[in-house]
Amino acid sequence: MKKQAFIIHGWEGSPESNWFPWVKTELEKNNFDVTVPQMPNADFPKQEEWLSFMQEIIGDTDRNIFLIGHSLGVIAILRFLEVLNTNQEIGGAILVSGFSESLGLVSEIENFFEKEVNYEKVRLHCKKFIVINSDNDPYVPTEKGEILRDKLDAKFIILHGAGHINKGSGNFELQIVVEELLKIAK
């Protein structure tokens, strides 16, 4: 069965932005089917819309499915895993510049944080997590990545001077995502 990866962008994001097209191409060279969907209403995201859209595009899960999230895409992935059926799981998740509680920065995304993440449920559906943060992210303090590391028992990678790990900080390629995904997909 072919391995599949889904790259979930963040607030105000798009499939063409940041390092997503580059990672997609690199993973396809490694025989993955890669989907980078345009999430609904990206400027004014609603958790319910994103969740039902992800359920629709991802469909039934198994260990050949891998999720990669950037920024708000990370909490979207956690919310997706939280509501999977008992017997459903995925092969792994890579969480880039992510956070699992409000940053208090923009009201548009607060609806994703109305209740705490049930990490116990999340871990039932995914055993391999990689958390990647930057030591100078202007929006997401390193501590937010440390929380994810601790709650998910994740491998934690700190990039130096990578900002929000997006196009604004010059990140159009992200080799670490490809390398780590290939490791957890073995």
Image: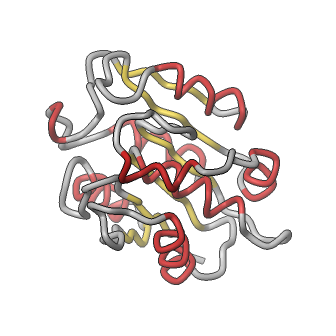
Q: With 50 as the anchor, is 15 left or right in this view?
A: left
Please determine whether, in this image, residue 7 is positioned above or below residue 139: below
Residue 60 in view, yes or no: yes
Q: What is the total number of numbered labels drawn onto the structure image?
A: 0
Q: With 31 as the anchor, is 129 left or right in this view?
A: right
Q: Residue at x 32, y 39 (%)?
A: 175
Where does the image place residue 174, in percent across and percent down from the top left? Answer: 30, 40
Residue 186 in view, yes or no: no
Where does the image place residue 40, in percent across and percent down from the top left? Answer: 35, 73
Q: With 91 as the anchor, is 48 left or right in this view?
A: left
Q: Quadrant of the N terminus?
A: bottom right
Q: Residue at x 38, y 47 (%)?
A: 107
Q: For residue 106, what is the image quadrant?
A: top left
Q: Residue at x 29, y 32 (%)?
A: 164
Depth check: 2 or 54 in front?
Answer: 54
Where does the image place residue 47, in percent across and percent down from the top left? Answer: 51, 64
Please determine whether, in this image, residue 139 is positioned above or below residue 112: above
Depth check: 91 or 18 in front?
Answer: 18
Where does the image place residue 147, in percent across and percent down from the top left? Answer: 62, 27
Color style of the picture:
secondary structure
Q: Residue at x 40, y 60 (%)?
A: 7
Q: Residue furthest front?
A: 107
Q: For residue 77, what is the image quadrant?
A: bottom right
